[in-house]
Image (cartoon, helix red, strand yellow):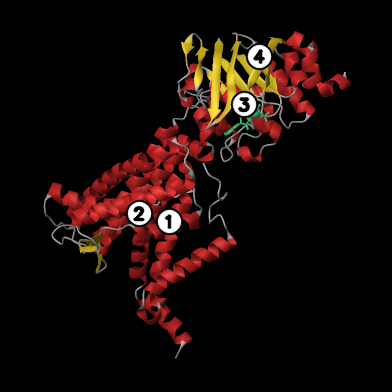
């Protein structure tokens, strides 16, 4: 579904990605793991057109999208939930959801109700401005907003960041449901254990390179992963 | 004598000429409000003050007066005829200023945005655009104050007489046109898809592009909206003051003040701020020492400072300094 080949991304003169290659197949959940500053967000931003690669190619559904502008991605079925949730602070929950369907025409009522079924708390808060929501609620809103565009590929940047364990559970189970409903998911996470339990495959990034990739099952038992990224949970198990 | 007498005589003058002060205040307020909306909307989407906006306003004055005369020929009107003339001037002023605003955005801002230039570069670029427009207008139409070409759009055109008082076309049309245009602008921003795009870009430009909002297009639309209102205001101001001038900075500063007073980034705040500054300026004229009307400017800016001390984000502003 998505194939990235030798992608290089620069911020000015700094090279943040030194030629990375990976792919995501239809129907999968693929996790991208790595320490702070490894280049995970940069990778997602590249895939959704926010930051064009200096070289390399991005093929999505058989089409070269390397030069497509960010605002056209959503119409192609790619939806990106950015790091830090980024809900529109002065818009209500419902207006935020409507923004997710900005490029679609026609009535949105049924779709909004569907999101409310998935995230009941959003219905309770539908008249509240985004800025008033808790972190968990904002994350749900950000995901709900992304789903409003009916994506075929959902990009999630650290959906569990800064959330209480119980909320993290909820978010991850929702990500599972989203995939079961037919949307392919590419998720960046620092919460490696949980991400790998959910994912089919994973890639590990270090300093702007993808150092290895494997099935999630293999990665969970891979000593390199356990030592570096699952350090805490090794003790916990 | 002294202070008490000064105050009493001020209130006395207001008492005898209340309706005149009110009309002038509303007229000026309408102009300030229409310009202020442009400052506030552009601040929303770009996170910067468009210092060339005063000249966008100025262009509306020149276009509304001269172009309308070129098209319609010299004519004066009374009654509904005068209303039609003023409306034609508003339309032409708005159109030309909207085009100028697009030009300013394309020439002065867009190239800098492409290169992620720092805010200071935008400021310098805006000052350049503003001098360019001032000088161009001066070269074409003469520098400094030009007395209005009296044949057409005579400032004193009378629309009708009410209870023995003559009502000038310009007063009525200014106020009604301002209300209509401000309400339309407010509706566009609040209740249309375009407006949702503008609000989204104002709150978080990058995320709005993830939602499918075309940022460049949205910014252009914002400049068109602000430009059209400023152009209409430019024509109305020329008509009210009976002159055209190759400068928009002075009125621009008042309107900018109105936008800040109302809460920069907030459309209704800008409209309210404009109205307030217009009325306040007018009603403070009788309190000017020795009849020197420059005191009204001092009073106005004192009020601005006071309001900002009490409410740093302006009357309706919720957030300050948050850029798009
Ligand atoms: N706008 C930017 N300008 C310059 N350098 C940047 C910019 N954004 C990111 N970088 C640099 O690129 C590298 C990768 O950053 P990125 O945000 O992709 O990391 P990350 O893996 O998402 O980290 P985190 O887990 O902290 O979110 C870092 O070295 C970072 O400093
Ligand atoms: Mg990141």
Residue B5 percent location from the top left of the image: 44, 86
Please tell me in which quarter of the rendered image ligand 1 is found: top right
- Confirm if mark 3 falls within 8 A of ligand 2: yes
For ligand 1, tell me if the residue under mark 4 lies within 8 Å.
Answer: no
**Marks 3 and 4, how far apart in space?**
15 Å
User: Badge 4 is on which residue?
Assistant: A30
Of helix, strand and loop, which one carries label 2? helix
Q: Earlier in the sequence, mark 3 or mark 4?
A: 4
Asked if the residue under mark 2 is in contact with the one under mark 3, i.e. CB atoms within 8 Å, the reply is no
Assess disc 1: are there few (<14), some (14-19) or many (≥20) residues with their C-alpha within 10 Å of its C-alpha.
many
Q: Residue at x 48, y 52 (%)?
A: B269
Residue holding disc 1: B256
Q: Residue B54 carries which label?
A: 2
Assess disc 3: are there few (<14), some (14-19) or many (≥20) residues with their C-alpha within 10 Å of its C-alpha: some
Residue A198 pos. (x, y %): 73, 14
Mark 1–mark 2 CB contact (< 8 Å): yes
Residue A149, image x and y in percent? Answer: 53, 21
Q: Where is B122 relative to A141, above or below?
A: below
Subunit of label 2: B
The residue lying toward the viewer, choosing from A76 and B15, is A76
Q: Name the residue under label 3.
A: A41
Please tell me whether mark 4 sits on a helix, a strand or a loop: strand
From the image, which quarter does the C terminus of chain A lie in? Answer: top right
């Amino acid at each position: 579904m998505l194939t990235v080949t030798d992608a290089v991304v620069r911020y000015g003169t700094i090279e943040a990605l030194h030629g990375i290659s990976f792919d995501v197949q239809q129907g999968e959940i693929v996790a991208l793991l790595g320490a702070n500053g490894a280049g995970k967000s940069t990778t997602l931003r590249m895939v959704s057109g926010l930051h064009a690669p200096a070289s390399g190619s991005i093929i999505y559904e058989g089409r070269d999208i390397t030069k497509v502008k960010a605002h056209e991605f959503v119409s192609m079925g790619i939806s990106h939930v950015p790091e830090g949730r980024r809900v529109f602070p002065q818009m209500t929950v419902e207006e935020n959801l409507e923004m997710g369907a900005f490029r679609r025409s026609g009535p949105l009522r049924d779709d909004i109700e569907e999101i409310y079924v998935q995230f009941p708390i959003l219905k309770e808060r539908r008249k509240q401005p985004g800025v008033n929501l808790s972190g968990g609620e904002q994350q749900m809103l950000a995901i709900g907003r992304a789903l409003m565009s009916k994506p075929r590929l959902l990009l999630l940047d650290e959906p569990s960041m800064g959330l209480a364990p119980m909320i993290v559970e909820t978010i991850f189970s929702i990500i599972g449901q989203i995939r079961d409903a037919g949307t392919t998911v590419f998720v960046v996470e620092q919460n490696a254990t949980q991400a790998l339990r959910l994912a089919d495959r994973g890639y590990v990034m270090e300093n702007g390179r993808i150092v290895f990739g494997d099935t999630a099952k293999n990665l969970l038992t891979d000593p390199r992963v356990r030592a570096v990224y699952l350090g805490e949970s090794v003790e916990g198990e | 004598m002294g202070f008490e007498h000064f105050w009493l005589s001020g209130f006395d003058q207001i008492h005898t000429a209340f309706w005149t002060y009110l009309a002038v205040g509303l007229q000026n307020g309408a102009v300030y409000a229409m310009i202020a909306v442009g400052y506030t909307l552009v601040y929303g989407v770009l996170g910067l003050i468009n210092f060339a906006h005063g000249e966008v306003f100025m262009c509306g004055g020149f276009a509304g007066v001269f172009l309308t005369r070129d098209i319609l020929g010299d004519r004066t009107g009374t009654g509904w005829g005068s209303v039609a003339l003023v409306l034609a001037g508003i339309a032409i002023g708005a159109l030309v200023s909207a085009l100028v605003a697009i030009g300013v955005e394309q020439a002065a801002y867009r190239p800098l945005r492409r290169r992620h230039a720092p805010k200071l570069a935008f400021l310098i670029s805006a000052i350049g655009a503003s001098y360019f427009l001032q000088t161009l207008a001066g070269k074409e139409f003469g520098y400094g104050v030009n007395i209005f070409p009296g044949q057409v759009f005579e400032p004193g055109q009378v629309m009708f007489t009410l209870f023995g008082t003559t009502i000038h076309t310009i007063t009525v049309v200014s106020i009604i046109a301002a209300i209509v245009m401000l309400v339309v602008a407010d509706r566009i921003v609040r209740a249309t898809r375009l407006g949702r795009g503008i609000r989204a870009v104002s709150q978080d430009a990058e995320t709005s592009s993830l939602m499918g909002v075309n940022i460049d297009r949205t910014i252009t639309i914002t400049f068109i909206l602000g430009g059209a209102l400023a152009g209409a205001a430019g024509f109305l101001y020329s008509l009210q003051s009976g002159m055209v001038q190759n400068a928009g900075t002075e009125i621009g500063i008042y309107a900018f003040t109105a936008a800040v007073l109302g809460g920069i980034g907030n459309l209704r705040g800008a409209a309210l701020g404009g109205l307030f500054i217009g009325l306040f300026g007018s009603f403070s004229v009788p309190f000017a020492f020795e009849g020197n009307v420059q005191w009204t400017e001092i009073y106005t800016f004192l009020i601005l400072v006071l309001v900002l001390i009490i409410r740093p984000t302006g009357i309706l502003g919720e957030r300050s300094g948050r850029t798009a």
